[in-house]
Image (tube, rainbow, N blue to C red):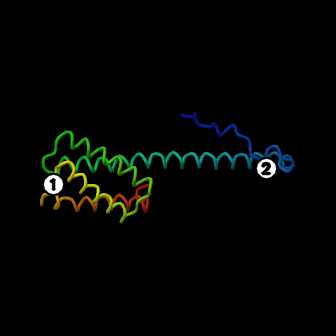
Amino acid sequence: MAEPLDVDRLPHPSAREVWFHALPRERQREFTRRYRDDLKHTASLVRKEQGRWKREVQQTSLVFGLYDLLLLSHATAATVAAAFVVGLLLGALFVWTDAKRLLAGTLGLATLIVFVFVSRGELAAQHLMVMFPMGGICAWLGFRRETRFFD
């Protein structure tokens, strides 16, 4: 991983140009200070976005894992672990596609249906009753992504 750039030592990009040297020293310092402040702000936005990506993937994984553990019948350690992995992959897909409410809800519900069918071998009536709230939870995660409500 690259070391963070020390923006307090960076000169203004136009520092070697004639027009920049023609400015009074105070004006040059002001230009440089504003340039460094912009760089710091950009770096903080990048860190915030990277943290958001990780947080959203972890939330989707947690929802799938807990859903399998608490609401679906015959949960084993293997199915719970698989649900966490499926949730990680689905969360990464949500972030990568920037899935909004409808897409997130639809993909979450479809993924859960396929997961239950593969891990349990059938879709029982109980599974169908507890699946539709998963679509709502995934849609809510998409709504948060869409509006950046909690950012």
- The quarter in which the C terminus is drawn is bottom left
Residue 132 vs residue 24, the one in the foreground: 132
Q: Position of residue 4 (x, y in %)?
A: 58, 36
Question: Residue 132 appears in which quarter of the rendering?
Answer: bottom left
The residue carrying mark 1 is 122
The label nearer to you, 1 versus 2, is: 1
Q: Is 98 situated left or right of 108 in this image? A: right
The residue carrying mark 2 is 27
Q: Position of residue 92 (x, y in %)?
A: 40, 49
Residue 122 vs residue 32, the one in the foreground: 122
In this rendering, is residue 88 above or below 127? above
Q: Position of residue 121 (x, y in %)?
A: 16, 51
* Amino acid beneath label 2: Arg
Q: Is 35 situated left or right of 47 in this image? A: right
Residue at 37%, 51% in the rendered image: 91
Please tell me how crowded label 2 is: few (under 14), some (14-19), or many (20+) other residues with Cα within 10 Å: few
Question: Residue 108 appears in which quarter of the rendering?
Answer: bottom left
Residue at 58%, 33% in the rendered image: 3
Q: Earlier in the sequence, mark 1 or mark 2?
A: 2
Residues at marks 1 and 2, CA–CA distance in whole angstroms: 72 Å
Please tell me how crowded label 1 is: few (under 14), some (14-19), or many (20+) other residues with Cα within 10 Å: few
Residue 69 vs residue 120, the one in the foreground: 120
* Amino acid beneath label 1: Glu
Q: Is 27 situated left or right of 38 in this image? A: right
